[in-house]
Each structure stands twice: as C-alpha cells, then as structure tokens.
Image: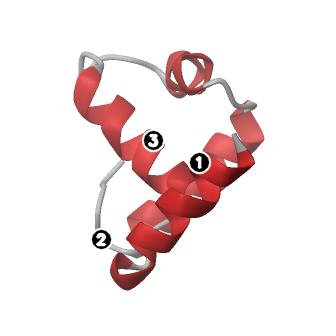
Amino acid sequence: VRVWRALIDQRLKPLELTQTHWVTLYNIHRLPPDQSQIQLAKAIGIEQPSLVRTLDQLEDKGLITR
C-alpha cells in the first residue's frame, strides 16, 4: 500500500495533489451529491477530521466548493 501511495503521490505532484486528494475527488464524483461528509469519510475509509482537513485543502486549491 505504501508503494502504491508513493507512486500515486509522485504522479500527482505536478498537479500539487496527493493520493488522499485524488481519492477524495474520485469519491465526491462517484457518490450522489446529497452525501454527507460523514458518509464520504466512510466511503474513503478515513476519520471525519482527516476528511475536513483534506476538503479544506481542496477548497483552497479551488477544486471543490462547499
């Protein structure tokens, strides 16, 4: 798993994204728009505070709006 994450992080580096950003964006796209942040965190397999931090980063980059 670590090797996979490192490879993804390396590929996403030019976009200033991480594997966590990518997985979050993918699941936002995949899930219905009425999903809560709690449901999104469960789908990704991370804790709510970690998701909030990731969403803040994606919002700062202009990739999502809440």
Q: Measuring 52% from the left and 54% from the top, which residue is drawn there?
A: 19
* Earlier residue among tags 2 and 1: 1
Q: Please, what is the three-letter code of the amino acid marked with disc 1?
A: Trp
Name the residue rendered at 34%, 78% in the picture: 15
Q: Nearer the viewer, residue 58 or 19?
A: 19
> How crowded is the residue under tag 2: few (<14 C-alpha within 10 Å), some, or many (20+)?
few
**Outermost residue, bottom direction?**
14
Q: Looking at the image, which residue is at 62% across and 61% down?
A: 6
**Location of residue 30 in the rendering, given as x and y in whole percent from the top left corner:** 26, 24
- Contact (CB < 8 A) between labels 2 and 1? no
SS type, badge 3: helix
Check residue 23 in the rendering and tell me which mark sits there, or answer none.
3
Tag nearer the camera, 2 or 1: 1
Instruction: Please name the amino acid that badge 3 sits on.
Output: Val
Q: Which quadrant of the rendered structure holds the N terminus? A: top right
Q: Which of 27 and 52 is in front in this view?
A: 27
Q: Which of marks 1 and 3 is in front?
A: 1
> Of callouts 2 and 3, which one flags the residue occurring earlier in the amino acid sequence?
3
Q: In this view, does 43 lie above or below 13?
A: above
Image quadrant where residue 51 sits: top right
- The picture quadrant where one finds residue 65 is bottom left
Q: Which residue, given by chain and number where applicable, does mark 2 sit on?
A: 62
Q: Give me the C-alpha separation between circle 1 and circle 3.
A: 13 Å
Residue 55, visible in the rendered structure: no
Q: Check residue 63 in the rendering and tell me which mark sits there, or answer none.
A: none
**Which residue does the numbered mark 1 point to in the structure image?**
4
Q: Distance between the residues labelled 2 and 3?
A: 17 Å
Judging depth in this view, the residue of 39 and 1 nearest the camera is 1
- The earlier-in-sequence mark between 1 and 3 is 1
